[in-house]
Amino acid sequence: MTHDKFLPLLGAYHDGEIRDPEKIQIEEHLRDCPACREELELLARIDALSKERPVAGPNGKYWDSFAARVSSGIRDRSTGAAPKEAAMFQDSFIRPQKNFAMRAWVFPLSFATHAILAAVLIVIPLLNTANLPTIEITSAFLAPPPPSPPPPPPPAKKATTSQAKRIKPVQTQSSFEAGKLVAPVEIPDEIAEEQISDVGIEGGVEGGVEGGVIGGVLGGVVGGVLGGVVGEVEAPVRAVGDVKPPRLLKQIDPTYPEIARQARVEGIVIIEATTDIYGRVQGYKVLRSIPLLDQAAIDAVRQWVYEPMIINGRPRGVIFTVTVTFRLKS
């Protein structure tokens, strides 16, 4: 052990509180270290001085009043009077004030204040209409233009009674037999035209179609009938493979919902639209939804008009997807 480690142990060595193994090491160190010997001698002189001084004790007045003080304490305890020391410490305790009336109105007032502050923080951004959003609508259609309709039949010639040629009937003997095909005996040199009635207007009706039928409507198609298509309407086809989505003819921009604009909601809504034979959207289904923007996209797509799809000479409905993009102004 070094000098710094022996020095704190000298007081315990002087008082006889060191064990024998450590005591032997300290004595060996004291023989070699004069500084530790001087420290030990100083501790011995201090101990001697403290023993030479008389012990201070209570004076005579303390013992003269001792009996009176003991009897006074016993009397106070028997009568239940609180001693002075107890009253002193009792004054040092902190007791909370029990004010129930104040608590009754402080809590509702605090709750109402917090509710008003929260409402103000929510309403103020909704009243800010400085930056209006922009709406971008993206409709990706890769359909080629539909084939051109077949040329209309040539207009029927108007015949008059003076130009009509009639062939006098000739009675001949028929050589046909039932159930057998027989080649004609003679081929006529001239075939008379049928008599055509004079029903109609010279030059046609404005807006009509060449070759129209009696009872047709303005703007109808060849062979069309009033209010529909001849025959049974076929189910719509899905725009996949060779069938391409129809071409958009009329597009209505959607209205950006105010609540979505205030909430800074934007994105793309994908709708599966179904058109009828006239190119009008008659059915829809939301494939990719944004709750605050779905209804605005549906209301706009239902007003769109597409070019009717003609398949095998008959109009058909088409099922295809439409994307509507909502984007806010930066």
Image: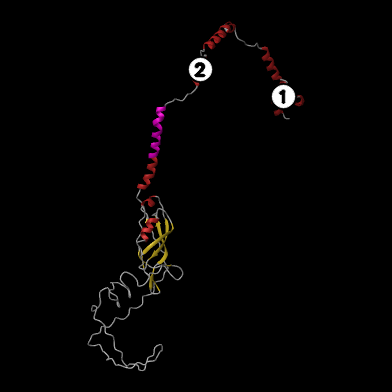
Q: Residue at x 39, y 39 (%)?
A: 115
Give residue 129's mark: none
Q: Residue at x 53, y 16 (%)?
A: 85
Q: From the image, which quarter does the N terminus lie in?
A: top right
Image: 168 above or below 137? below
In magenta segment, residue 108: yes
The image quadrant that residue 111 belongs to is: top left
**Which residue type does callout 2 highlight?**
Met
Image: 329 above or below 124? below
| Residue hosting label 1 | 36
Is 132 in front, or is 312?
A: 312
Marks 2/1: CA distance?
51 Å
SS for dot 1: helix
In magenta segment, residue 67: no
- x and y, in percent, of residue 252 in the image: 34, 61
Q: Main secondary structure of the magenta part?
A: helix
Of labels 2 and 1, earlier in sequence is 1
| Residue hosting label 2 | 88
Look at the image and give the residue range highlighted in magenta: 100-116
Image: 74 above or below 325? above
- x and y, in percent, of residue 141 in the image: 41, 66
Is 142 in front, or is 65?
A: 142
Q: Residue at x 42, y 65 (%)?
A: 320
The image quadrant that residue 183 belongs to is: bottom left
Q: From the image, which quarter does the C terminus lie in?
A: bottom left
**How are the residues colored?**
secondary structure
Which is more foreground, mark 2 or mark 1? 2
